[in-house]
Image (cartoon, rainbow, N blue to C red):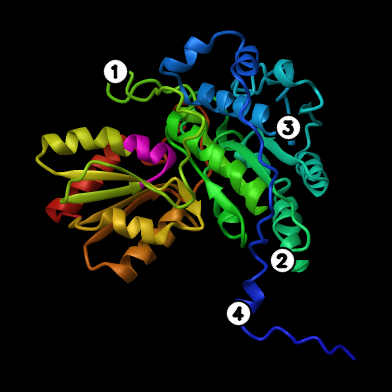
Amino acid sequence: MVQRPRLKTAREVMASLVPPPRACRPTPRPDTKARTAAFGGRMEALGEPQILSRLINWTLTDLMLEHREIVLMGEDVGRKGGVYGVTQKLRERFGPDRVIDTLLDEQSILGLAIGMAHNGFIPIPEIQFLAYLHNAEDQIRGEAATLPFFSNGQYTNPMVVRIAGLGYQKGFGGHFHNDNSLAVLRDIPGIILACPSHGADAARMLRECVRLAREEQRVVVFLEPIALYPMRDLHGEDGGWISVYPPVDEVIPLGEVGVHGSGEDLAIVSFGNGYYLSRQSGQRLAAEGIRTRVIDMRWLSPLPCDALMEAVRGAQRILVVDETRRSGGIAEALMALFAERTRVPLARLTAEDSFIATGPAYAATLPSAETIFEAALGLVRGTK
């Protein structure tokens, strides 16, 4: 007869959702000679403003230099350097044993990552497009995320799953390459879902994601907005969306949100492409005399509730802009949070409950700078 005490409370059941941290051997920063060689001798370029995709590439370079247990794998990540060039030259820098071209099969990619994580590596698998994850989502839900739960923290699958996704790609893809469905990822207990909107943020957040995998044994999904990979400008040709590569010791901790502006008339809460479009709308709202602040969630799961509440403090109205679908999207959780913990007027602007079209209608079902402006104006003036 089993004499061990049985679980009785929710707290006891949930204790193993997050595995216990492990002591990591400190790793020295790579010296200047090693970095110069890895960056192709062009260290001066690190001080020049760059697009998001290049800053992710440089971040991966520094992380792989510092942590020899990191291994990348995925479709076309090696020789081709990724569909969008994000992993360009990493195979030449680190060799085919650390940058692995895989079969065109997402189950194999995540299965390989799980096996390597079991053996002390920190895998960074790439899923080429968010829609492709749905072919293999049970590798995360039924395997990687549940192993610490069912083993009471004895075994883990630490990894950082990079996924290129979300909408707004022009002239390419349809619903297989433009996908705004995040419900399955947010529904998995214990995993972390990160989504940067800006190059410097992406670098700092990816470093934190790797730390969470190495030191806290977490399964982390790093969602990269494809449409923002090459983005240079915010308003016209202003270079307003490129940034300098941040110093290697700078990180954005899990749960820290971004806030642009301090206006009290309206707080716009968004992420990814929605944050970019909301920033565009902010200029037009200012011309209408509406003082706004725009909040970048950055961390989509677990929801950074306290940080979000602090970010909207003092705002007279809150508009949630969510490029995921109205049903099952991020906005549902945000509206519930703000309804429960504030008494200010709320509104949400989301994508339609639809797949994304190809061709000229690629953004027809998604929020736009124009619809964000209209929704904000209507909320402030009481017409919506």
Tell me which segment is drawn in magenta.
270-277
- In front of the other: label 4 or label 3? 3
Q: CA distance from mark 4 to mark 3?
A: 39 Å
For the residue pair 206 and 143, the one nearer the viewer reads as: 206
**N-term-proximal mark, 2 vs 3:** 3
Label 2 vs label 1: CA separation? 49 Å
Residue 181 seen in the figure = no
Q: Nearer the viewer, mark 2 or mark 1?
A: 2
**Label 4 vs 2, first from the N-terminus:** 4
Query: Which label number is shown at residue 238?
Result: 1
Residue topped by disc 4: 10
Badge 4: residue crowd in 10 Å (few <14, some 14–19, many ≥20): few
Which label lies toward us, 2 or 3? 3
In the image, is residue 274 part of the stretch drawn in magenta? yes
Q: Amino acid at mark 2?
A: Phe
The disc at residue 123 is none
User: Is label 4 in contact with label 1 (beta carbons under 8 Å)?
Assistant: no
Which residue is at 77% across, 46% downward? Answer: 117
The answer to whether residue 97 is above or below residue 279 is above
Task: Name the kind of residue labelled 1 in the image.
Answer: Asp
Q: Residues within 10 Å of mark 2 (few under 14, many from 20)?
A: many
- Dot 1: element: loop
Q: Secondary structure at mark 4?
A: helix
Look at mark 3 in the image and give the residue it sits on: 68
Q: Position of residue 370 (x, y in %)?
A: 27, 36
